[in-house]
Image: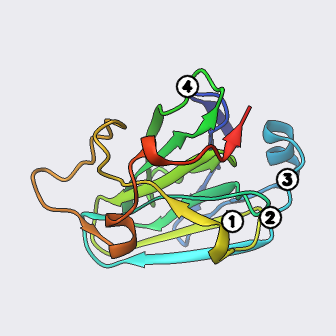
Amino acid sequence: MQVDTFDIQGPLLFTPARHGDARGFFSETFRQDTFDAAVGPIVFVQDNHSRSTRRGVIRGLHYQAPPFAQGKLVRVTRGAVFDVAVDIRHGSPTFGRHITTELSEDNWRQLWIPPGFLHGFCTLTDDVEFLYKVTAYYSRAHDGGVSPTDPDLGIQWPLNGAEPLVSDKDAKAPPLKHLPKIFSL
């Protein structure tokens, strides 16, 4: 499994090998020992699966506050997404900056987003299947977000002029400058 870093410390990109033949393919999509060597000992407690039916759906930017802060290992098994992680760790030299990567059924990449980051994605195709493992159970009381269209973040969502399809919750999320100090280094 290949592991790559970004300009912002924390997120990692994992690319599992796929072994194919006339029948299809086989892939080890997760190995605890490989993951722990790259990230440290992590326990995943919940797997989630979302489906987005059309191109241009934006989900996020979300976080979960302590003591239910979530690390996420995300991947796409159908279609493709433009995936984003934003550093919201106060005291970090990269606070407010983001990384992006494309995750798809073709490139087979997985993105690790540690606690202290917002996460979101935009579907690049119709019929996207998005799977992710998390390190803490979902807690509605600790769930939060930032507007995915906050101009201060400078995220260039790949919409080609189309209006994004965003949930009411995400559309009403505050800008980053109104986010309380939740995570610190």
Q: Which of label 3 and label 4 is nearer to you?
A: 4
Tell me if residue 15 can be seen: no
128 w.r.t. 31: above or below: below
N-term mark: 4 or 1: 4
Q: Position of residue 105 (x, y in %)?
A: 45, 61
Q: Amino acid at mark 1?
A: Lys
Spatial CA distance of label 4 from label 1 is 25 Å
Foreground pick, 101 / 115: 115
Return the residue at label 4: 94
Give the secondary structure at mark 3.
loop
Q: Quadrant of residue 15?
A: top right
The location of residue 111, given as percent across then percent down, is 59, 48
- Mark whose residue sits in front, 4 or 1: 4
Quadrant occupied by the N terminus:
top right
Q: Earlier in the sequence, mark 3 or mark 4?
A: 3
Instruction: Say if mark 4 contacts mark 1, CB within 8 Å.
Output: no
Q: Residue 170 in the image: x percent, y percent?
A: 38, 66
Rounded to the nearest whole Å, what is the CA distance between mark 2 and mark 1? Answer: 6 Å
| Residue nearest the viewer, comparing 117 with 181 | 181
Which residue was labeled with disc 3? Answer: 42
Quarter of image, res 164: bottom left
Q: CA distance from mark 3 to mark 4?
A: 23 Å
Disc 1, SS: strand
Residue assigned mark 2: 44
Give above or below for 182 relative to 62. Answer: above
What amino acid type should be assigned to the residue bearing mark 2? Answer: Phe
Q: Please identify the quadrant where the C terminus is shown.
A: top right
Labelled disc at residue 133: 1
Q: Is residue 82 left or right of residue 116?
A: left
Badge 1 vs badge 3, beta-carbon distance below 8 Å: no
Name which residue lies at 37% across and 37% down. 153
